[in-house]
Amino acid sequence: MDSTVEIDSNGVVLAEAARELQQAMHDARVAFDCIGLDEVDRAHTHTLMARAAMDAAENALRVALGGERAEMDA
């Protein structure tokens, strides 16, 4: 029974990782478009948001693989 709970838990974690990766792709596309429109400040903001989503996805995958959450750099 424990393995079923673990699989269900990993499924939720993997779904969250996938959602974060989709968000990162969206923010990267918006940043790209902002650069084309010469809106550098908005591009920078969306680049930072994409990076945050990638970090969240990495942490979710690390948890799904049985590791610890990554510590945030100071």
Image (tube, rainbow, N blue to C red):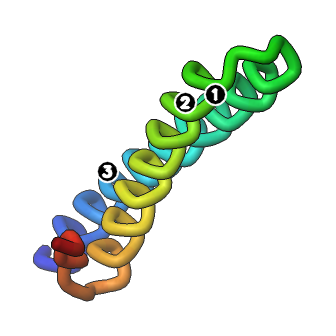
Can you identify the residue that label 3 sits on?
12
In depth, the one of 54 and 11 nearer the eye is 54
Which is closer to the viewer, label 3 or label 1?
Answer: 1
Give the Cα distance between marks 2 and 3: 26 Å
**Label 2: how many Cα within 10 Å (few below 14, some 14–19, many 20+):** many
Residue 30, horizontal then vertical, whole percent: 69, 23
In depth, the one of 39 and 64 nearer the eye is 39
Which is closer to the viewer, label 2 or label 3?
Answer: 2
Residue type, mark 3 in image: Val
Q: Identify the residue at horizontal 23%, vertical 74% (top origin).
A: 73
CB under 8 Å between discs 1 and 2: yes
Residue 41, above or below 14: above
Give the Cα distance between marks 3 and 1: 31 Å
Residue 33, horizontal then vertical, whole percent: 80, 20
Q: Is residue 8 left or right of residue 65?
A: left
Residue type, mark 1 in image: Ala
